[in-house]
Image: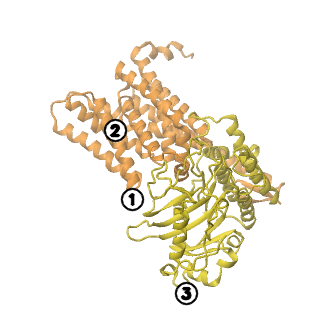
Amino acid sequence: MKIMATSSSSWFHRRNSTNGIFNSKGNNSINKISSAFSYLVLKNITYGYVPHKPIIENINLLIPRGRFVGLVGPSGSGKSTLVKIIAGLIKPWGGSVEYSYASANNTGNDIEIGKASNKSQGQKEIDNFSNSPLHPSQSIPKNRNGSGNGSGIENGNGNGNGNNSAIIGYVPQIETVDWNFPVTVKEVVGMGAWDKSGVTPFFTKDIVSEIDQALDSLGIHSREFGKRQIRELSGGEQQRVFLARALVRRPSILLLDEPTSGVDHNTQEKILNILISLSLVGITIIMTTHDLSGIAKRLQWVVCMNKRIIAEGYPREVLTDRNLLRTYGLGGDGDNNTDDVTDVKAC
Amino acid sequence: MVLDPNILLQPFQYEFFRSAIIVSILVGGVCGLLGVYIVLRGMSYIGHGMSHAVFGGAVVGYIAGFSFYIGAAIWGFVSAFLINEITRRNKIKADAAIGVVTTAGFAIGVFLISTTRSYTRNFEALLFGNILGITAQDLLVIVFVTIITAVFIFFFQKRLLFTLFDKETARVYGVRTDMVELLFSLVLATVVIASMNSIGVTLLAAAIVAPAISARMITNNFTKMVISSTIMGILTAFLGMYSSYFFDSASGSTIVLYGAACFGICSLYAYLRKIYQTHSHDMLTHSHPHIHVNEHKHEHL
């Protein structure tokens, strides 16, 4: 597992080293040339599928670049919805998703993030952070898919034409995919680079090489598996193919919706190790999960949510009986709780 | 008894037949090409529906005194747009939207025919096709539409494939999926309009769908499916057209029957291949024990 994780992270690091986004140690230092964001800021996100019945309400999150975040909550708590809002698929009723390009290292006015005892204090911190003249925040008004003012995400290809947007990689739930579709593994991964080699149906040699490398780095040998139809792969291999498709885009944010569902324990371990290694080279990872014991405990940062944020922080501090009872609504007040942020720890 | 080759070449002596063969090859090929995307979209009914919808527009155009192509085009594009918008905005699925919009269009045509007494055009040809009555203008339109379709598929191939396979992720990665789907529907409407005269609105759906589902039976590879479907569309159209001369049958229906036969042959091939693979696998297990991880993957014990 470790060898695989190392190969995927080192491959990604080598590919991005010329961009200067990550230094040689893979730390999250900001390069002067780089246009990578420093923080992903979710401000007062509210949305629902039925009018006047929000499924998520007043979500406020401040996610530093390179953090590996797990969204935990019961079915219907809004985890996938929040991920889709970040991805730009859904325009929220209210609030915004923004990027901050400030460096926490180049200001003398450090704000202690997250040491909040209640929701209003937490909101103040986010407001202070994004409105401070020392912490310029760039709000992207509209993405290419017309998500409008609410999302504030630019989902471009990040070609650097004065575009300071984050590049998003998205891995959907396996259950949403038509596995009988007649596509091969390479064709699926190639979709991630659809806009990187012109308007013809063909890919350039460089892109083909990147596709092969992305697959190889995730343990899917391109020569052996490249021409297989995706239905012929196991669940874990299918997830990794989707991950390769996301990595080909060189994302700075990786969004995954239940990436470990439907796979066995060994495969879960493989996928988790790959994601951990990717976060070490500076990719911000946000994934939803139901697995509290196997997955959530091993993540860098956990956000418990059920319509609102119940708690966020290190797993050992957040995954307490009290928080879980409140998150899963078992004997607690679940999504009716108005005192949302009670256990928030600074990074 | 030796077959006289002159008999086989006899139809090609006639200019109308040569035109008809060219038209049938072009229509068969373009329908086979588009059919792949329609079948994979799960909208096989749209060919049937669209062809009925443009019938209404064609009748309106003729009765109003301008080219029936224009009337068919206007209503075809409006139908394509309405189907896309209804599906995108509302809770109903595409097949329901197709059913309402397109049958309404067809009903308009029938209504006008039944109430208007001053028309002379034989609309039966529109319903069942009259490939032997193709004019130079019709041929030009078909050639133009074939080129437009081929160019569209060529330059939008990546976007189309991504949208078909995983529309949500395609949107995240910047594909304008709504625009892609709308353009595809407009191209389909164009093909339907251009093919109406040759195949007929009642049989056009089969001409679109049959080659694609036949190709799907024999391959799991998208590129091979596109190539196979296009070739099958061309072959069935050519053979159907050619045979209709000797059978003295309606060309449109003969082409469709060849398409159905092609589907039967491909289905049989797929069935026999599956039996062969299962039989080969069973023979292998006696000497090579293993367990199944999933249907196609083995783990060796």
* Drawing shade for chain B: orange
The amino acid beneath tag 3 is Gly
Q: How is the image coloured?
A: by chain
| Residue B97 falls left or right of residue A330 | left
Question: The disc numbered 2 marks a residue on which chain?
Answer: B
Discs 3 and 1 carry the same chain letter = no
What is the secondary structure assignment of the residue under circle 3?
Answer: loop
Residue B87, compared with residue B244, is above or below; it is: below
Q: Which residue is mark 3?
A: A331
Query: Image quarter for residue A260?
Result: bottom right
Residue at image location 24% in from the left, 42% down from the top: B108
Q: Position of residue A55 (x, y in %)?
A: 47, 70
Front residue (pair A20, B43): A20
Q: Which mark is residue B103?
A: none
Quarter of the image with the N terminus of chain B in it:
top right
The answer to whether residue A339 of the structure is visible from this angle is: yes
The amino acid beneath tag 2 is Gly
Q: Give the chain letter for yellow.
A: A
Front residue (pair A320, A295): A320
Q: Which residue is mark 2?
A: B76
Q: Position of residue B72 (x, y in %)?
A: 31, 34
Q: Position of residue B154 (x, y in %)?
A: 53, 33
